[in-house]
Amino acid sequence: MDDVAPTLEEFLKAPRDTVAQVAPATLIYSNGGSRRAAALAGKSKSEYPQWSLSQMQRVIRLVFDYDVQHLFIPMLMPNQLSETTPGYRENLERWVDRGLAGPETLAQWQSHGWRVRLLGTESLPFLQPTAQRLSAQTAQQSRHTVWFYVVSESDLPWEWVLNAAHTSQARTRAEAVRALYGEDIPLATLFLSFGKPLINHDLLPPLIIGDLQCYWDQKPGYSLTDQDFRRILYDYAYLRQTWTADKADRELSALEHRHAWEQAPILGLGQRLGPFWYPQSAQPER
């Protein structure tokens, strides 16, 4: 993009290649509420796995269309493995295996030329064949890599880091990244998640967290649209870039927007909608 920031309206209509110039190299996308999204779309429980998979593939394609190179997606987290919903745990193995590395899905990965990997299966042996098929049957080299990862216990990411550092004798973060992931990966600078503003070691892949700009969508499931993503990229690239070395007279600008600062909402406060959390509405600036 030009040195002068475009307006949001210009950005939303700009050619995709132009918008892609400000997209991050590495993005973390933590989806949530997929069963809720299926219910809202009128999908039955039997339709849910295949429908959710198609939505996930659509979002991956959308993100890669803006030339994000590394996309990290948490696939199984400790809370999912602890769930007592009837039938859920019993079907989990089949859903994840077929969803990530079944014949139809492998054909999709191959048709796009994406490299797809599954990390963290050391503690979930039933997924090790899934990881092996992905490694063997998707691209060995690609500009675009999907890194799915599973975490069965909250402390496991620490074990991954410590074991990788010990085994490789890594002395720097870059060396530890190569030991853990097998290659250099640019630090992640954009995190897209869902629901409550929450960060923990389950969600964030270890060692690659940079200056992470975070956004929490409130639409459940893989619902990200092209316009949604452009709005996020605009905020990420232009509105959040506020730091300057020269702080002189910045307080005068603050006085110009006194009401906004003195009546500011607290981001993160919410309300209950049935069994769900939902953010309180922020009061617009006058």
Image (cartoon, grey):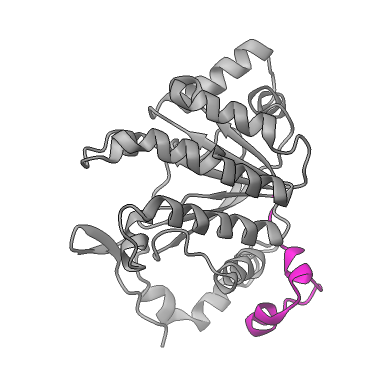
Residue 14 inside the magenta-drawn segment: yes
Quarter of the image where one finds residue 82: top left
**Residue at x-position 54% and y-position 69%:** 225
Residue 73 appears in the picture as rendered: yes
**Residue at x-position 51% and y-position 27%:** 120
**Residue at x-position 24% and y-position 59%:** 276
Q: Residue furthest front?
A: 103
Residue 88, relative to residue 168: is it above or below? below
Residue 78 place in picture, x, y as percent: 35, 34
Q: Horizontally, is 132 left or right of 280 in the view?
A: right
Considering depth in this image, is 97 or 220 the residue closer to the camera? 97
Considering depth in this image, is 23 or 75 the residue closer to the camera? 75
Residue 124 place in picture, x, y as percent: 43, 24
Residue 107 place in picture, x, y as percent: 65, 46
Q: Residue furthest right?
A: 2
Q: Horizontally, is 252 left or right of 278 in the view?
A: right
Quarter of the image where one finds residue 77: top left
Residue 158 inside the magenta-drawn segment: no
Considering depth in this image, is 143 or 138 the residue closer to the camera? 138
- Pick the quarter of the image with the N terminus: bottom right
Residue 33 appears in the picture as rendered: no
Task: Give, as a single range, the part of the protein colored magenta.
Answer: 1-25
Q: Residue furthest left?
A: 274
Residue 254 place in picture, x, y as percent: 52, 75
Residue 219, relative to residue 201: is it above or below? below
Quarter of the image where one finds residue 2: bottom right
- Pick the quarter of the image with the C terminus: bottom left
Task: Count up the numbered dots.
Answer: 0
